[in-house]
Amino acid sequence: MIIDKKYCSSSYLMYRTIANHSYSFSEKLMPSFYQMPKEFDMIHDSLELEKSLKKSIEETCKAHKAAIALSGGIDSAILAKFMPKGSVAYTFKCVVPGIDVLDETPIAAAYAAECGLDHKVVEVYWEDFEKYSTELMKHKGTPIHSIEVQIYKASLIAKKEGHDMFIFGESSDLNYGGLSGLLSRDWTIGEFVDRYAYVKPYYALKDSVIVTQPITDCNKDGFVDVHKFDTGFFFVEAMGSYTNACSTAEIGLSTPYAKTRLATPLDLKRIRSGENKYLVRELFQRLYPGFPIPPKTPMPRPMDEWLANWEGPVRSEFWEHCTNGLSGDQKWLIWCLEHFFNVLDEI
């Protein structure tokens, strides 16, 4: 393992992970990474996708006391259709006192009622991030993705209520063309680095490096093969957040979409004309006739509100005022990186 704080810090700000798995922030904590499955169910159409997802849910629920994380989106709604009647469905609700923020619970409740599930709401507060981040970082060996706190809190509740397996709809977007912004055009290497990087390291760190390898590995005649990037590097980074949160809580994780892969080339023409994730859409419309397809939203985490008054990092590694003008999600990455440095100092 190569110890390189500059590389790891820069990579985390750009990609929310250490891009090269041979590197570590410190010898005090070794990072853990999600391991790509060796085999997938190869999917040609929405009927094959339905068969694979249904089989996965049935096998999981037969072997475990499983609960499902149910959002307001179509991915988890599809999985909910295959859950046994009376199963518990948890929906995350972020709370900012005195401010209305995105709330997926009403539409998730409608899905749960349609499927005969016991719907429960997990309220998430900023105090949960302060409470749980350290444990999650120590378990992962790196700073974390903000969704890990919500998943961890819900996992603790699910485990306390007797469940030993948590089902999520993660990776549908990555596998089936749901990230229409990234797939909206052909990107040169440099353009995609600028488009994808969450925080450019030199904005925040006095000692930084630009990490391009995850993107240059997907070079195709000077342009980026975005679907290869999504189903490779991005897939591993995203799944690592779910596995870390659930394993820290000591509960099993099932992600049925992550066990599948599109067997045919992604139809970029359909995606760019507004029909993103077309196979998943077909399946949703077949299972939920009369239900509208909701707009795509990420897992709620109102960082703009939670970090509105944060004045930025104070450690010497960071430039003063480096969070000026940044979004809440960008501030989170810097907050989290500084917190991780403090954790390392205390070990």
Image: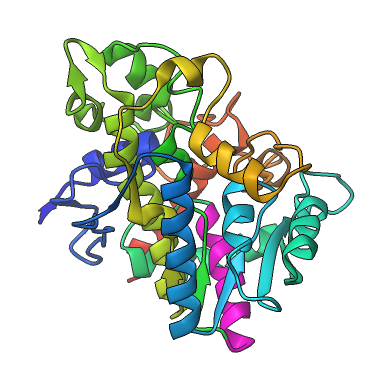
Comparing 180 with 149, the one in front is 180
For the C terminus, the image quarter is bottom left
Residue 98 position within the rendered picture, expressed as x and y whole percent measured from the top left: 89, 49
Residue 314 seen from this side: no
List the single residue furthest toward the left.
Answer: 1
Quarter of the picture containing the N terminus is bottom left
- Counting from the top left corner in percent of width and height, residue 131 is at 59, 69
- Residue 174 located within the stretch drawn in magenta: no
Q: Is residue 101 above or below residue 50?
A: above
At 43% across and 21% down in the image, what residue appears? 183
The colour scheme of the drawn protein is rainbow
Residue 26: quadrant of the picture: bottom left
Question: 4 or 259: nearer the eye?
Answer: 259
The residue that appears at 26% across and 62% down in the rendered structure is 32
Q: Left or right: 95 with respect to 51?
A: right
In the drawing, does residue 266 fall left or right of residue 249?
left
